[in-house]
Image: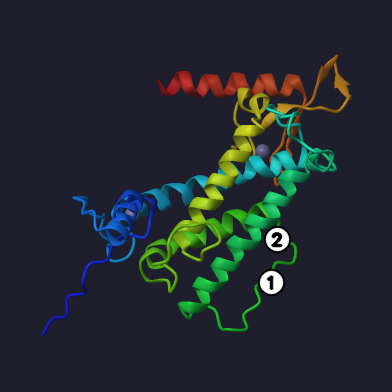
């Protein structure tokens, strides 16, 4: 005797139109011809693919937000008409700091939830985060959530909830974090940061001209703005490094 569970419609945004049509059907009796995306068994394949892409992209987005928290700049599209004085952040990086604190809190909460539900952590496990840098905590949480993604999306007790913000559905939470970080980095583009070569130490795209006033031969330092790296070079050292990089690329071609 095989008990085949009845397929359930995916709770994700893929079924927004279908849910609307079902609501109209229930209210007015107007039938529709839409077929829902079915859960496999809970989220559909499309929602699973999207969650995987988003959790993979999150570390880089969050690093950009972290950089903004440290080297805060004003958003480019500052709307002045509707803003009240108390909408103005107390210091330039404040909005980024608040976002990082919120997202890191939510990510570590889901991480603890998943690891406890799956019996990897005991109910009273308190991770030792002494001396662990924030960047490591962010990437660590993303890595663990990615490793448990399929379980979270298909079997977490809240996996069947709609993806609305504030719900506990892990797929919806990942969507919300990704959207918040992406919205933020689009408002605060770090254009100047990405023009330079990758950092020789951390390989990240965060080398930039130093904003402090110390100069060597009338030229600014080149610094890595990744808060976990902070490699610093003179412009001459940077140019030597770029030449060496170019030579490697030419040889490989
Ligand atoms: Zn779906
Ligand atoms: Zn670096």
Q: Circle 2 is placed at which residue position?
A: 132
Relative to 230, 12 lies left or right: left
Q: x and y percent of residue 11 in the render?
A: 37, 60
Q: Which mark is residue 128?
A: 1
Relative to 47, 64 lies left or right: right
Task: State if disc 2 and disc 1 touch (CB < 8 Å).
Answer: yes
Nearer to me, 218 or 2: 2
Q: x and y percent of residue 154 in the render?
A: 35, 66
Q: x and y percent of residue 132 in the render?
A: 70, 61
Residue extending furthest toward the front = 28
Q: Residue at x 36, y 51 (%)?
A: 16
**Disc 1: CA contacts within 10 A as few (<14), some (14-19) or many (>=20):** few
User: Looking at mark 2, is its residue's CB closer than 8 Å to ligand 2?
Assistant: no
Q: Is residue 193 visible?
A: yes
Q: x and y percent of residue 19 in the render?
A: 33, 56
Q: Residue at x 29, y 62 (%)?
A: 26
> In the rendered picture of this protein, how many numbered marks are placed on residues?
2
Q: Determine which quarter of the picture holds residue 41.
A: bottom left
The CA span between labels 1 and 2 is: 8 Å
Residue extending furthest toward the right = 213
């Amino acid at each position: 005797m095989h008990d085949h569970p009845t397929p359930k419609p995916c709770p994700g945004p893929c079924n927004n139109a279908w849910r609307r049509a079902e609501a109209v059907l229930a209210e007015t009796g107007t039938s529709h011809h839409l077929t829902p995306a079915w859960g496999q068994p809970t989220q559909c394949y499309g929602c699973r693919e999207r969650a995987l892409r988003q959790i993979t992209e999150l570390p880089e987005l969050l690093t950009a937000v972290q950089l903004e928290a440290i080297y805060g700049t004003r958003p480019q599209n500052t709307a002045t008409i509707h803003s009240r004085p108390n909408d103005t952040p107390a210091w330039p990086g404040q909005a980024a700091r608040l976002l990082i604190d919120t997202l890191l809190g939510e990510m570590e909460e889901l991480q603890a939830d998943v690891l406890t539900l799956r019996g990897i952590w005991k109910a009273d496990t308190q991770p030792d985060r002494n001396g662990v840098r924030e960047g490591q905590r962010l990437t660590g949480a993303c890595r663990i959530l990615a490793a448990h993604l399929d379980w979270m999306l298909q079997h977490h007790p809240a996996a069947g909830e709609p993806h609305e913000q504030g719900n506990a559905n892990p797929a919806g939470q990942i969507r919300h974090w990704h959207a918040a970080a992406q919205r933020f980095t689009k408002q605060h583009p770090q254009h100047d940061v990405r023009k330079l070569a990758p950092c020789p130490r951390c390989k990240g795209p965060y080398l930039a001209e130093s904003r402090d006033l110390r100069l060597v031969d009338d030229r600014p330092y080149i610094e890595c703005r990744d808060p976990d790296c902070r490699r610093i070079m003179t412009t001459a050292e940077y140019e030597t490094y770029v030449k060496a990089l170019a030579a490697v690329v030419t040889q490989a071609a």
